[in-house]
Image (cartoon, grey):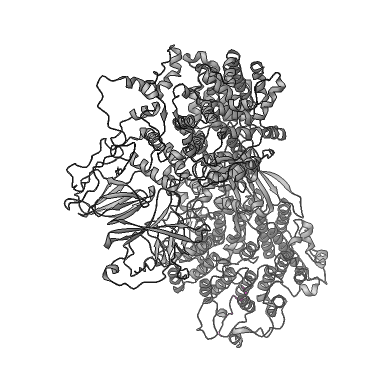
Amino acid sequence: MRTAECSHVGDGRTTSSPGLHSRSHSPAISNMAALSRSHSPAIGVPSFSGVQRFNMSYTPSPKRYSTSHSPNSTFNDSLLANEAEPIAPRLCIDHLWTETVSNHRERNCQATKAFITSDLCEQKFLCFLVESQHQLRCVKFLESNDLSQLIFLSVTTISARDAAPIEGIDAMLVLEVNGSLVLYTGVARVGKVFIPGLPAPSLNRSTPMPRPSTPLDSISTPARPVSRHAHHLDEVVMLSPVPELRGSTKFNESSLIEDCTVQPFGTYVHAMRDPVHNRVTLEMNNGSLLRISIPEIANSELVRKCLLAIKYILPKEIAVKVLIKWYNIHNAPGGPSCHSEWNVFVTCLMTLMGYSTDRLGWTRNLDLEGSLSPVIAPKKARPSEMGSDDDWEYLLGSEYNRQVDSHLLASALNLDSVEPLPPNEELSSQLSLDHSAPLFCHIPAVFYVLHLVYEELKLDNLMRDGTRSLVILLLQMARDLQFEEYIDFYWRDYPSIFKTSKQSCIIDQAQIGHMNQPSFFTVEPPCVFQWLSCCLKGGGVLPFPYLPGICERTKLVVLSFALYILGDDNAVSSDVSKYLVKISAGQKKQVNEQDSKRMSMIKPCVLNSSIAEKLVIWLTNTGFTLKDLESVPFGAALPIRDAIYQCRKQPSSDWSEAVCLLIGRQDLTKQAHEVTLAKGKATIGQMITSDMPPANEAEEEDDGMNDMNQEVMSLIWSKDLRVQEVRRLLQSALSVRVNVVHLPEFNDHEYIEEKENKLLQLCQRTMSLPVGRGMFTLFSYHPVPTEPLPVPKLNLTGRAPPRNTTVDLNSGNIDVPPNMASWSSFHNGVAAGLKIAPASQIDSAWIAYNKPKNAELANEYAGFLMALGLNGHLTKLATLNIHDYLTKGHEMTSIGLLLGVSAAKLGTMDMSITRLLSIHIPALLPPTSTELDVPHNVQVAAVVGIGLVYQGTSHRHNAEVLLAEIGRPPGPEMEYCTDRESYSLAAGLALGMVCLGHGSNLIGMSDLNVPEQLYQYMVGGHRRSQAGINREKHKSPSYQIKEGDTINVDVTCPGATLALAMIYLKTNNRSIADWLRAPDTMFLLDFIKPEFLLLRTLARCLIMWEEILPNAQWINSNVPQIIRENSVSLQSQEVSASEDLNMETLAQAHIYIIAGACMAVGFRFAGTANSDAFNCLYKFARNFMQCLPASTAVIMGHYNLETCLSIVLLSLSMVMAGSGNLKVLQLCRFMHKKTGGELNYGFHMAHHMALGLLFLGGGRYTLSTSNSAIAALLCALYPHFPSHSTDNRYHLQALRHLYVLAAEPRLLVPVDVDTSTPCYALLEVTYKGSQWYEETTVELMAPTLLPELDLLKQIKVKGPRYWELTIDLNKGTQHLQSILSRDGILYVKLRAGKVSYKEDPTGWQSLLAQTVNHRSPEVRGFKPEAIKTFTSDAALVSFAECFCKPAKNLAHKQDVLSLFTSILYECVTQENPEILPTYMAIDQAVRRLERKEMSETFELWQIKLVLEFSSSKILQERLKQTPGEGLLMNSEFLPVMKCSSDNTLDQWLYAYGDVLKSYLTGQPYEEAHMNMLACFLVYHSIPTRGKIVGVCMEGATSFSDLLKFTRLGVPVRALLRLAPILL
């Protein structure tokens, strides 16, 4: 024998196992199982004596027939639960050994198919089909108690040609050798399968196979002939197994199809394949395919639950027999239709228990309902056409007769009730049970579990008919078993049933002794409503029995009450046994006195939001939904609804979508849904912007700013046209106005030259606009993948008035710098690319698709590539494309690409990007490598790229190289001789980024002496010898530049200063900061450039971060004393002369130090809109502007003043970033209008960058103050601006765009969830306490920019107009960050009757709702049409139309209309419309009680639970704590309903007190009063007669004697009513 090498038996589906395709050489592997080699170590050969044991991994399959998470879910729901998850192996078999094969017969014994099946009782079988021997070998196995091993038991062999598992019904379909299809469950044979439309195998008898006696109504398509084209798949949706019921005592089976043999002719089944759930494909001998569906074990939910309960409680062998018997009866050809399934089930069950159903009255009637096939019921003689007495008896005893009897029409027409005829004497003789029936011994256990199913069904409104059907069966069994407590219990639930059902069967006491009495059986019937009532009263509760997997709703409601009412936090986690006792078939422990003492006497705790929150989250985790809640009876559901209502008022923003859906908060549900969407999907913000109508088609094509979210910006800046003004200032697509006066002394040629010179000045401004425009339109556009990105034109022409003639620079009249617009085009491309939002759907193909064919646009495309890196999309560009772009050798493209990929990989140390950058940096290449001719600007970009990729990593090698590169000397042959300053600065910035904020924690770099080396670069001195691998490169000095052995600080100082600032950022290291202090002597001041003083001051302040203060006094404190005492102040108009001091040096040093300190304030308070910082900086900006025209400007220098003014303006915009402050806008507009003079391209760029920062991202973005953001801003706002458009000597222009890395979305935009439009909402923002201020709360009107999130404690949407919503930032900022990153959309829900702030800023229009909220008596005066003011819910509007409008025929029901109207307004204005059905149900139940038409006490139980909940201690405690809080239900409605119920029952008691007394004393009483008597007993909690007799009612002479009944749970108010009768 050769065992399978390895098998991995799945669900008949292909897995993605790595070993799947490496198939074994064994032919035992088929397409039915996915096989792979197990990687577990081989185990030793086990002993085979007795039971074989193997160490195996085993994953149990999901249990069949178990209810899924949702208590209301249907049977098939569980099949889709794990559809998306990978298929886990259910059994892994390891190869141990292979036996040698002795003969040819054994050599062919390899299995061709393997699968796992289970029987109806979850017993597992591993099945191997040995096709060569026509055998199916089924190995039974089970898990050991510790779940570590599998125990293999018996092996059963079934004769079969093929087999397939039918997992949906725990069965398998076997194709026998004779061609018959037979259904098995495990190894038990169920019966043969008959397929409509398929010729049956030829039989060796003359009798043909039975055809269906009734048409199969479930077949969706008629049976097709199978002689179709090969492989055509026909499907039969339903088929019936023909039963094989040998030796049945009740049913007459047809034995016509046993022992049949196949004659090989015609079409027959050849094989089976593709089993899924309960469907399988049959392969016919002619090649055609037939898809068949095996019927379920039951269609009715009631029957299914009963079968589950019976199967659960019975021993496995008996349970399998019972289920097979039922399955054959249910699915016999011509069997019952769906509506009579319950009747067949009852008949089958009672027969199996030993009842003679054709002699028992009510079951005999069941046989007459529906056409029963000959298989199920004995063949009856054809009745006469005239009918018989049996028909009349059947009608009298039918359910329909009982319903008519209690109907309004019967009482209105004064119809006498027609009683059933007295029973036939033949039938009325004493009936007995057959004690040899299979289930006779298990009748008590079956009865008890069916009672628990009955209690489960009572908690489902949709199963009310099922409870009525089930109670008839239970009542019969309780009568026969003489369970008096149960009989009384069922009578109280359904008193009307007792009028018709009185027949009982006699069970001999000796036979009762043979019955198995289950240990879990209780004499007192478990009542779930009684348990909930005790819970609400605050008394002790015993654990309630339940069947796991069957009574899930019971478990859910019981534990919900335990958690919410008793306040036990552990009820739903560790302490379930306190409240639930699990029934199990093997349970031997009796529920004895010790268990009774284990009563959970937990004192009720105060209801609070945390308990409600726990309940709601737990319910959601169990799969409970609003749909399930609607089917829970209103009394049992009320505490759950109350918890939901409490959570709805004060929800948490980070709850899951399911929780938000359960509590009915549409705003939170939609918010949670947005969070769970895939990252790549478009956000709602895109939808909002895309809905905006285009303003002007021509404008839309031109200025590049038409994709802004106008709707949000109109809310932020609603009172003026500042946004339109910004667009006007930043547009570069239209020709500028060239206004030159034609003076008489100018000839025409000179006039043209003058206009072109003027245009050249204006073009300096135009070329600087794209950087600012990129800031304004940041991340505002979602491109269409099929269209190229629109890039606005950079128009460098002008229009001269009055004739509007075109002025062009290409006429040749004046000298125009070459490539003047090259960098402007680059910036224009960056601005266009930065419009693309990070969440947009773009890929590598789209990026390449945008590559322009025109070579003149290459610079724009280079900028576009850099922008894609900054917004994270360049990572999608294929490596091949990157290589293609770099090999072209286009300088701008290389710069944009290198900076872009580096920004996209910020701080990742990505090796592929590192290699890419190293090729462009000679210092990072090996000494022996080939020298590459890399353009200088590309080297600068690559060096900064290294800093970005290694930001904050303290990478030793890169830090060493960059430190050396700051002081790289010029080489021979003009190497490294031009624009050295920008390279040194780039190396300094990169070094600062690599070691960002690490300060003295530069691990592993102590030998580099980084701060000392940087200090030397800053102040000068003797050049150190080059160390490392590049020392050979710097041996030869430059032939052009003679620097000697000293460091050229003019080159190295800026980079070294900023490197020190970034390395020691926010460390407050005073010793390093003192290095950067401005010199305090005139001698030292002469040795340092004034602009370097700016950098030193800025660097020093960044290190001493905590000391920066937003006031003029602190800014002036940075100025050394010698300058303060002798220099010209910004306010002075006169210049004082001095012989000893150089006033020019002092003045220039003064303004640069002031500018540096202002810039430090800008960094410290970036994005905060701090009013002190704004006022301070605004004051200095005004002072600098006043200095420009003054006489002092000569000493300070116009260029220096313009530089400092630009820096202060940028600092001001940093503080007010994204706020659109009007004063700063006025300053920017003033600077925009200035052209010519000292205002060069760089100053214009600074001014428009300030304008762009002010409106960053259209008001959606602002600046961060994180270390990474400050590093990016230092690169972008470096305070030395280019003198012309191609100037990159001191600073690479491309770095101006790195501000994007410092921008973060912080605009919170409330969006009305009903209209999906942005709106105003009041926010309450709470700041954490800090060293500067205590915990503070401020109110903001959103849309608004939030402060930095780490400063905040919580954000709350404040009422009264919108539902409250709290975002708790103590739990983390991830949730708020995810909201802000998706355009900051926060969904809010307008309260009923409220009007938005936009429509009603003052709040006057909401007065109507306020009058209703205070329950004004004028509520009756409201018209139903006004409902639309409060709600758009179609159901509520329809309710108002149908039930609240007065009509002529309803004049006599004015009080009903008034009640409905007041209830409706109560629900709508208190915003709990889900409670409206509860109001209606209570009102209808009370009216039915008043009319004495209550045939069952179900609704009375619910009213009782509602009243007990409203008067419960915990609810009263909550009202004491929060008296202003509204209750779920109107406090005035319930007392009225209670009073009506009390009066009705008291009147009945007054009139028919003797009926109650007769019941209590055991005397007979009139059946006419049964219904009201049951209502009275239930409503007043009167115990059963047996309990009352036990307490000894006789001899009670005073009320004090009656008080002993309170031990039985009888309330005192009930005893007061009983006293006149009993005493």
Q: Is residue 966 above or below residue 870?
A: below
Q: Is residue 978 magenta?
A: yes
Residue 712: x and y, percent?
A: 56, 45
1428 left or right of 1600?
A: left
Residue 89 in sight: no
Work out which residue is located at the far front of the displayed protein and give it: 510
Residue 457: x and y, percent?
A: 49, 35
Q: How many marks?
A: 0
Image quadrant holding the N terminus, namely bottom left
Image quadrant holding the C terminus, namely top right
Residue nearer the viewer, 479 or 169: 479
Residue 325: x and y, percent?
A: 36, 42
Work out which residue is located at the far top of the displayed protein and give it: 414
Magenta stretch secondary structure, dominant: loop
Residue 956: x and y, percent?
A: 63, 76
Q: Is residue 1134 above or below residue 1591?
A: below
Residue nearer the viewer, 1052 or 1595: 1595
Residue name at image x 77 percent, y 57 percent: 1112
Q: Is residue 369 above or below residue 61?
A: above
Magenta stretch in the rendered image: 972-981
The image quarter in which residue 1374 lies: bottom right
Q: Is residue 546 magenta?
A: no
Residue name at image x 28 percent, y 35 percent: 374
The image quarter in which residue 647 lies: top right
Residue nearer the viewer, 651 or 147: 147
Residue 757 in sight: yes
Q: Is residue 72 above or below residue 1052?
A: above
